[in-house]
Image: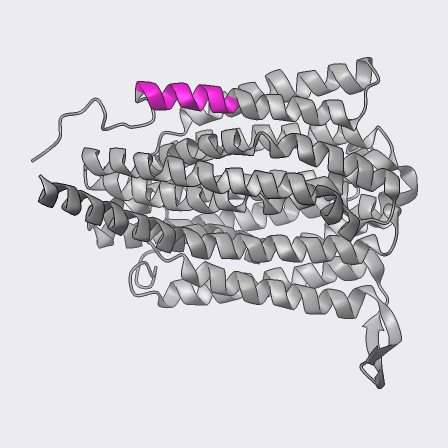
Amino acid sequence: MQRKENRTQKLNMEMITVIMTLAWPTMLEQLMQTAVQYIDTAMVGTLGTQATAAVGATSTVNWLIGSSISALGVGFLSFIARACGANDEAAAKKSVSQAVLAVLTAGIFFTILTLSISSYVPVWMQVDKSIQSMAARYFFILYIPMLPRTASIIFGTVLRAAGDTKTPMKIGVIVNLINVVLNYLLIYPTRTMSLFSFSFTMPGGGMGVIGAAIASAIAFTFGGICITIILWRHPRVSPKGQKLRPDPKILRPCLRVAFPNMLQRFGTSLGYVAFASMINSLGEVSTAAHTIANTVESAFYIPGYGMQTAAATLAGNAYGANDKKRMEELAAMFIPIEICLMILSGGTLFLLAPGLMGIFSTSEEVIALGSTVLRMVAVSEPFYGFSIIIEGMMQGVGKTKEPFVFNIAGMWGIRIVGTFLCTQLLGLSLISAWACMIAHNLFLFAIFLFCYVKGVWNPLSRQKQLP
């Protein structure tokens, strides 16, 4: 009996080690991205509230485009993770060649689309007329390198599905460092600086918001090129030697998973656009507070989304190996780890909210409003963390239809309708809009909890285990 307990504890520790080995590079990568987002917002914030609003006003459209591309990656993640779990490297490599075709198709399509609509986006987002031109130019420059951005997203997902989370992390770190350095050189004008007792002239472009856009565009281009080269040379999932033509046997199951996820991300991101548009109509202070609070909050979701990537990959592996016991053990491991991480994350956010808002704005009104909504959402983070893990495991095994329905219902039925009633009809403030967002998160927790208890998330739960 004692020996059996010791063996179980050993297996549990091994599983925790595997989980954290997969999760920590993704967490670090997202932490670096968020740190750069913090720095970008802080740098632009020194130019004034208008500059912050111009950059933030189109951020939800950025999510809409990025999340639609990420959905394609989820389809390949599910297929590749299952192929790796079944030790079918030939199928994994064939699916990567299809991912290359997806990058080329989606990258070219979204380049044409985003550049064509760049002048209209600020108008659709109800941005103040005084900053519409600035916001449009920022958006246009940001999306010139859409093809390498698409490669970064999809190829990064391919590598993570194959169990390589460190390579996307390393590239992400380099990309973010490039972005920060170029921001520093392009946003500010040439000026005299002092370091200890030495004074020197620091060259600068003095381009403001446009400089921030150029810096990001260059960094994205570098990242896309690097990850493409590394994937091509990868020993396990390189597309080298594969035919770059559509293969229905691979594309059908990938798209079957990707399409509901794409609809989900598109629908929820479109909801974010509608949500932000209603907030933008509340004025500059609300727009700036919302933009900064979103930036601050994003850092505290890192544990959740880092663990989600590991959950999706390992669940896909277990499904490919038809290992029902391992699937159930994974869920039993992931859920308590995730909830503990999100409790710690939410508690930290609650305590540090005013100080974090103060990094990005000197306006007392903006800081006070942003701190209030951040402390509200901090309380809901552990509940949202549970939803993230179950959704990730469902993505890994290819069950994306249910999360699509849940997320669309929560976004449009609770958040958007509630925000419209509160802000547009009742004339309430940003606080009411964030209360609707929290209600949306709690709805997702309740419905994913139901899926977990009933076993809906696990396609092996109602199947007999193969010998």
* Residue 22 seen in this snapshot: yes
* Residue at 37 percent of width and 21 percent of height: 451
Most common SS among magenta residues? helix
Q: Nearer the viewer, residue 427 or 234?
A: 427
Q: Which of 112 and 273 is in front in this view?
A: 273
* Residue at 68 percent of width and 16 percent of height: 417
* Residue at 68 percent of width and 45 percent of height: 352
Whether residue 295 appears in magenta in the rendering, the answer is: no
Question: Which region is colored magenta?
Answer: 444-454
Quarter occupied by residue 78: top left
- x, y percent for residue 74: 42, 41
- x, y percent for residue 213: 74, 57
Does residue 310 lie above or below 25 as drawn?
Answer: above
Q: Nearer the viewer, residue 92 or 411?
A: 411
Q: Is residue 438 left or right of residue 19?
A: right
Q: In this view, does 425 lie to the left or right of 314?
A: right
